[in-house]
């Protein structure tokens, strides 16, 4: 279990806040903000895979029909209590939960992507149209109880309506009479406490028999219920009470029904929250261009181009410096460099990204990264000075280090910021050395920042330790925030002071107070920094040259292939022209022979002429045939290869070859075709899918959630759209998508006209901008 203090020190809650904004449901948000690292490597990898699958679905612009659902846990629990009653509003929300659960289940059932890990979450979704219909029969979409929710309610409301009509007629008659007698200023009726009353001038109230309900603010008007209507008003109110009791009885019945399926509904609510949370993680991954690393313990912990999520959110991809490093499990890296150079950010980036991975999240890093499953993350970051406990900075640090030493083992990643700080440098350095050596003995993996030169020496001389530093631009006298592994760093105190404006004489005087060995080390570090920068420049130049040479090599190969292709075409054309010439010549000679024969020429002369011509034609044909055979034999086929018949779109898989490999049997969908191999060309696996569609007709269980019309002509899509809508309607789909693209708008408008005419369409509209906008039409079916 990773301590709450560690999560707070690494600001994990801020990342959760970023992701929670992508959630749609109330419980999905709760899931995200309460996330804690998983304790099992397999669970972590499975969750990472779910996020990857969700991301692939979103990239394909398939929008899962997740909608807002409030937290209904308490309401579902209440439904299980005998005699309990849920309001019509709450019942409608529970019905909506059932509808959305069914829609999500149907979405994944028809999704083109395999998404096996995501599909597992849908197994607990509540799917029961009968349950939805039961609520539909009782409550309207606005939350009103329907007249025909029960026979008794229908009769009560009918009686109320009849009596109300009678009452209206009586009151209107009386009101008219009062107006004629000037008892009232206007001929209108109003309500007080649910009873029909007439506004009467105050001076005439004694002339009217009835019950006074109230008077105006000025006292000039009183509201009287005439004696003649008292009984009828009472009857109506009595009926209204009866109506209320019947409504309560009906709601109790529906509540009881909900109570019988509350456990499946709770499981569905939980599954929807999980699905919502996974897609929120996927949306965040798309935004930050994230990926999920491997979790291989036998390979070094390797972070490639990792970025701190909070800095990435603030500054963007281009302005956030990436971090790349590797560390073997059980090793220690000592990081040195100037203040404000980015040492602490290295620790926080590493710790925060590891926390995200342990929660199954994608991270803003290259996909080639490899993380380890650490059971513990222990940190000492920031100033722990406590006024309440009367602890100095050093005291609070060593108390924390004592706790870390007690907990550390080979399954721990430990992040220590400015170890040994807060006390006299030599004592602090000695104490820090002892801590790091103890952690090494325990097999812990450690990243530690420091300013102590003694730790640089320790890292250089001790097996299992490695120096690292933050790069510093000596020319500009400022940090670059880039991590350099294998080299210790300098504090660059004098260089920074010089840039600020201190005079050379003052700085030279200050250097005299440096111990001789320390000054030599600083000079050595500066020299190493300069040499390292020079080597990096050379490596960059070599890399550029290699890229240039690789490009030239590729260009040469491309030109060579083009040359060979042109050579074959020229040779083929030449042979064709030669053969054509000889055939033409043969015809000419035949004509000449015919003329000779007609003139009674010598038979032997005719025979010799014919043989000469035949030999010439045969020579050319043999030459052409030999070249054709060579070209055919150059393409070899094996069983299970994918091939396409030349000059056709027919593509299949070879399942049988003759011994001489001159004939092949290919499978195209369910059709077997036997052809000569000389009539085939190699094809890729994707091409066979297109070909198979010609021979395969899907049944209704395989109806697609989306129809892709991109590239189709507007005047040729009506049949395809209607067929798709009919199939979806027959398959009880409630929502589908038609992808037509934006383009000129002609295809979009054609789809719109078709949808207007189709009887099964309830509503249609464009997708949200972030999921395709006017390029996708979402269709709701009746």
Image (cartoon, helix red, strand yellow):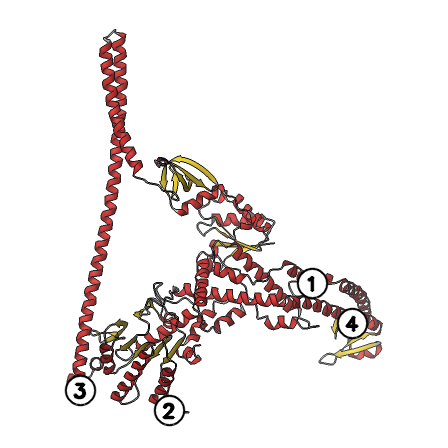
Q: Residues within 10 Å of mark 4 (few under 14, many from 20)?
A: some
Farthest-out residue, top: 600
Q: Residue at x 18, y 80 (%)?
A: 521
Q: Secondary structure at mark 3?
A: loop
Mark 2: secondary structure: loop
C-alpha separation, residue under disc 1 versus residue under disc 4:
23 Å
Query: For the residue carrying disc 1, how many other residues have a C-alpha within 10 Å: few (<14), some (14-19), or many (20+)?
Result: many
Q: Is residue 496 visible?
A: no
What residue is disc 2 on?
391
Image height check: is 611 above or below 239?
A: above
- Estimate the spatial distance between the alpha carbons at disc 2 and disc 4, rounded to whole Å: 74 Å
Query: How far apart, in angstroms, are the residues tagged by discs 2 and 3?
Result: 32 Å
For marks 1 and 4 on the same chain, the one whose residue lies earlier in the sequence:
1
Nearest the camera: 431 or 171?
431
Labelled disc at residue 237: 4
Residue 417 in the figure: left or right of residue 698: left
């Amino acid at each position: 279990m990773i301590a709450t203090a560690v999560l707070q020190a690494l600001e994990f809650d801020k990342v959760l806040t970023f992701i929670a904004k992508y959630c749609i449901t109330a419980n999905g948000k709760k899931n995200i903000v309460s996330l804690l690292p998983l304790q099992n490597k397999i669970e972590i990898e499975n969750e990472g895979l779910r996020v990857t699958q969700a991301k692939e679905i979103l990239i394909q612009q398939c929008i899962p029909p997740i909608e807002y659902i409030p937290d209904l846990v308490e309401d579902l629990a209440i439904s299980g209590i005998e005699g309990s009653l849920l309001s019509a509003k709450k019942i409608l929300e529970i019905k909506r939960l059932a509808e959305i659960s069914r829609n999500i289940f149907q979405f994944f059932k028809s999704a083109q992507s395999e998404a096996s890990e995501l599909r597992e979450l849908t197994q607990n979704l509540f799917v029961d149209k009968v349950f939805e219909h039961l609520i539909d029969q009782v409550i309207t979409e606005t939350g009103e109880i329907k007249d025909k929710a029960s026979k008794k309610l229908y009769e009560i409301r009918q009686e109320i309506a009849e009596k109300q009509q009678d009452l209206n007629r009586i009151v209107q008659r009386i009101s008219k009479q009062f107006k004629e007698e000037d008892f009232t200023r206007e001929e209108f009726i109003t309500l007080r406490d649910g009873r029909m009353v007439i506004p009467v001038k105050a001076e005439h109230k004694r002339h009217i028999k009835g019950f006074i309900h109230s008077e105006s603010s000025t006292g000039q008007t009183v509201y009287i219920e005439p004696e003649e209507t008292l009984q009828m008003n009472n009857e109506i109110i009595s009926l209204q009470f009866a109506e209320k009791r019947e409504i309560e009885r009906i709601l109790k019945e529906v509540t009881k029904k909900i109570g019988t399926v509350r456990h499946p509904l709770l499981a569905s609510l939980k599954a929807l929250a999980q699905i919502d949370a996974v897609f929120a993680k996927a949306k965040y991954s798309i935004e930050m261009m994230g990926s999920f690393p491997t979790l291989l313990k036998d390979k070094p912990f390797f972070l490639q181009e990792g970025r701190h999520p909070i800095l990435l959110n603030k500054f963007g991809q281009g302005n956030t410096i990436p971090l790349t490093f590797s560390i073997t499990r059980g090793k220690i890296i000592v990081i040195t460099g100037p203040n404000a150079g980015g040492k602490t950010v290295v620790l926080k980036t590493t710790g925060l990204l590891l926390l995200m991975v342990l929660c199954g999240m994608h991270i803003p890093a290259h996909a080639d990264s490899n993380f380890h499953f650490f059971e513990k993350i222990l940190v000492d970051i920031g100033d722990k000075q406590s006024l309440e406990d009367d602890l100095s900075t050093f005291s609070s640090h060593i108390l924390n280090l004592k706790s870390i030493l007690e907990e550390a083992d080979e399954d721990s990643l430990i992040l220590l910021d400015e170890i040994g700080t807060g006390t006299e440098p030599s004592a602090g350095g000695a104490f820090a050395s002892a801590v790091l050596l103890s952690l090494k003995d325990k097999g812990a993996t450690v990243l530690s920042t420091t300013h102590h030169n003694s730790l640089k020496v320790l890292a250089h001389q001790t097996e299992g330790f490695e120096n690292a530093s933050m790069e510093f631009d000596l020319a500009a006298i400022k940090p670059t925030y880039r991590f350099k592994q294998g080299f210790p760093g300098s504090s660059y105190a004098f260089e920074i002071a010089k840039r600020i404006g201190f005079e050379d004489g003052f700085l030279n005087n200050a250097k005299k107070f440096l111990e001789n060995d320390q000054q030599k080390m600083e000079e050595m570090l500066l020299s190493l920094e300069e040499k390292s920068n020079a080597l990096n420049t050379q490596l960059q130049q070599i890399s550029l040259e290699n890229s240039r040479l690789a490009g030239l090599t590729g260009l040469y190969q491309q030109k060579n292939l083009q040359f060979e292709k042109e050579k074959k075409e020229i040779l083929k054309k030449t042979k064709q022209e030669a053969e054509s010439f000889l055939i033409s010549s043969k015809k000419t000679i035949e004509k000449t022979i015919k003329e000779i024969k007609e003139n009674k020429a010598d038979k032997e002369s005719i025979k010799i002429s014919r043989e000469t011509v035949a030999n010439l034609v045969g020579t050319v044909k043999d030459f052409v045939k030999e070249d054709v055979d060579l070209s055919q034999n150059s393409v070899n086929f094996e069983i299970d290869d994918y091939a396409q018949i030349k000059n056709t779109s027919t593509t299949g898989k070879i399942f049988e070859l003759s011994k001489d490999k001159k004939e092949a049997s290919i499978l195209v969908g369910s059709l077997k075709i036997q052809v000569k191999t000389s009539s085939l060309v190699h094809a890729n696996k994707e091409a066979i899918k297109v070909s198979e569609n010609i021979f395969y007709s899907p049944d209704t269980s395989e109806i697609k959630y989306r129809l892709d019309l991109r590239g189709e002509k507007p005047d040729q899509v009506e049949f395809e759209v209607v067929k798709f809508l009919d199939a979806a309607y027959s398959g009880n789909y409630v929502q589908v998508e038609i992808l037509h693209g934006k383009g000129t708008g002609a295809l979009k408008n054609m789809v719109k006209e078709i949808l207007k005419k189709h009887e099964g369409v309830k509503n249609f509209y464009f997708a949200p901008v972030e999921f395709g906008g006017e390029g996708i039409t979402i269709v709701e079916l009746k």
